[in-house]
Amino acid sequence: MSELYLMRWPQNLSAVYVNGATIQYSQDQSVFYANEVLSPGQTICTWSSATDYLASGNSPSLPLLKINKTYELSLQLKADNDLPVQVQIEFFDSRQEVLDSYRGTDSRLKFKVPKGTISYEVRLVNLKHEWLRFESLSIGEIGAVERIFETSFRPHYDWVHVCPLRRSNHKTVQLIVNQGPRSILPVSLHESINVEQVFIYTDGQAIDSLIQSLSYTLRFKPEAQLSLEAGLGYYYLPSEFIIKLKAGLRQIEILGGKNNDELDH
């Protein structure tokens, strides 16, 4: 099993350079950031794996990673010119001294977590831009991001549609319902699972919109049999949500799977 994590724009404004900036949040959770006076080399925003929650009330915006393991960072954004945006990663020890750092201007950056790492940060650095539209940041094992077929981010729900590692003729699509939305979306990719999966993160609201969104990503699967599975924190979801989700899914597809009733408990 490999883990893939998706992160959006930092929720903590203290992690964003706001002086002179115009920041617009879209319905799809992408963020438009413009700053005509932003100098080259200035950090636009920062994600951190460790925060002082008692002092700031802010949760970590990066996942915990394994020591001595190699990962790949992938960035989804658009900017005002052909010049790239720089990404920097710094790893810190228990004294908050830098153990190692990586930087690059490609949309993907490979890195290895050094021994002794206690925390790390990812920074988005301006080179020569006046605006950019940020969509998402992901960290996972090498090539894991390539399994993402489609994503959708909304105020009350997110979902990540992933393809199996190997091509398959299976018509089943697993819908894995998790409590959310979350600042860090964990996606567990199992090599042994050879069906498409949609990881859903929801707070139980805007169900009609969620169902319509799911029908869109399944538009090329008219004969798919949908299997509803239990995910992270599913026991927090009200039974009314499960009933409505099942009813809506039955209207667009055949709802199958042997573990459907598990979500009712």
Image: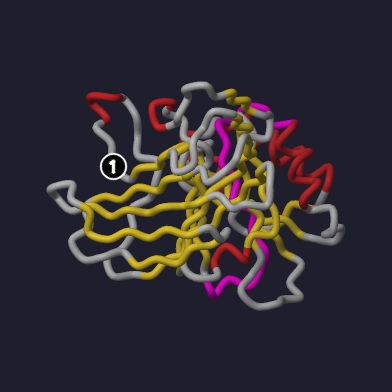
In the foreground, 54 or 15: 15
In the foreground, 210 or 126: 126
Q: Residue furthest left?
A: 95
Q: In this view, does 109 lie to the left or right of 214?
A: left
**Residue 156 appears in view:** no
In reply to whether residue 202 is colored magenta, the answer given is yes
**Residue 192 appears in view:** yes
> Which residue occupies 53% across, 74% down?
191
Question: Above or below — where is 169 with respect to 30?
Answer: below
Residue 150: image location, x then y, percent: 70, 54
Residue 86: image location, x then y, percent: 50, 51
**Residue under circle 1?**
50
Residue 123: image location, x then y, percent: 42, 45
Three-letter residue code for mark 1:
Ala
Label 1 crowd (10 A; few <14 / some 14-19 / many >=20): some
In the foreground, 205 or 46: 46
